[in-house]
Image: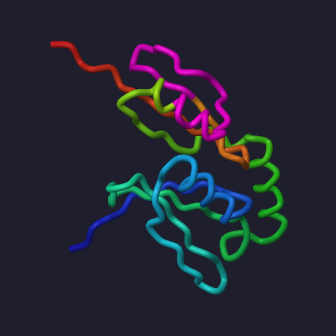
Amino acid sequence: MFNTTRISQIFVLDQDEALDFYVGKLGLEVSADIDLGFMRWLTVRVPGDGDREILLEKPGPPSHDEATAAQIRELVTKGALGFTVGFTTDDCQKTYETLRAKGVEFTDEPTDRDYGIDCGARDPFGNHFRFVQHKTPTS
C-alpha cells in the first residue's frame, strides 16, 4: 500500500524570496528543496506536520509554456487567484501582532466570526491566506 501527502500549491514569482517569507517570516520549515534541472521542487510545511506541504511553484516549464506562465504571473501580482492556503492558530490576535511586527502585510485584522476569529494576509507576490482560531465547542 502507499501513503499520501497533501500538497497545496502556491504560485510564487521568486522562490528564494518565497523562502525568506514563508520560512523567515511565517516560521514554516523547508520540507524539500530539490533542483530537478528543469525546475526547482520547493515545499514548506508547518513544523512537525509531515502530512501537509505547500509547493512554492514558479510559473513556467514543465507545467506551463511562457505565454501561460506570463498570464499566471500577472494574475498572482494582481492577487486575482484568490485564497491560497489557510492556517489554524490557538491565538489569532497574537499571531497577527507577531507577524505584523515581522512585516507581514495583512488585508484585514482579527475579526470575531461565527466559526472563530480570523484574519487575512498576503505574501509578497499577492497570494491571499488566512489564519483562523476556531471557537471552542460548548457542551
Coloring applied to the structure:
rainbow
Q: Residue at x 60, y 54 (%)?
A: 10
Q: Is 108 colored magenta in this rendering?
A: yes
Q: Quadrant of residue 100?
A: top right
Q: Tell me if 117 is positioned left or right of 104 in this view.
A: left
Q: In the figure, 108 relative to 102: above or below?
A: above
Residue 2 point in image, percent of width and height:
25, 72
Q: Residue at x 53, y 56 (%)?
A: 23
Q: Nearer the viewer, residue 93 or 42?
A: 93
Q: Tell me if 138 is positioned left or right of 74 in this view.
A: left
Q: Tell me if 59 is positioned left or right of 78 in this view.
A: left
Residue 84 point in image, percent of width and height:
58, 44
Q: In the figure, 86 relative to 48: above or below?
A: above
Q: Residue at x 33, y 60 (%)?
A: 50
Quadrant assignment for the C terminus: top left
Over which residues does the magenta segment extend? Answer: 96-119
Quadrant assignment for the N terminus: bottom left
Tell which residue pokes out farthest to the front in this image.
101
Q: Quadrant of residue 126?
A: top right
Q: Tell me if 50 is positioned left or right of 81 in this view.
A: left
Residue 109 point in image, percent of width and height:
59, 21
Q: In the figure, 22 relative to 60: above or below?
A: above
Q: In the figure, 27 relative to 5: above or below?
A: above
Tell which residue pokes out farthest to the bottom in this image.
37
The number of discs equals 0
Q: Is 45 colored magenta in this rendering?
A: no
Q: Residue at x 44, y 58 (%)?
A: 53
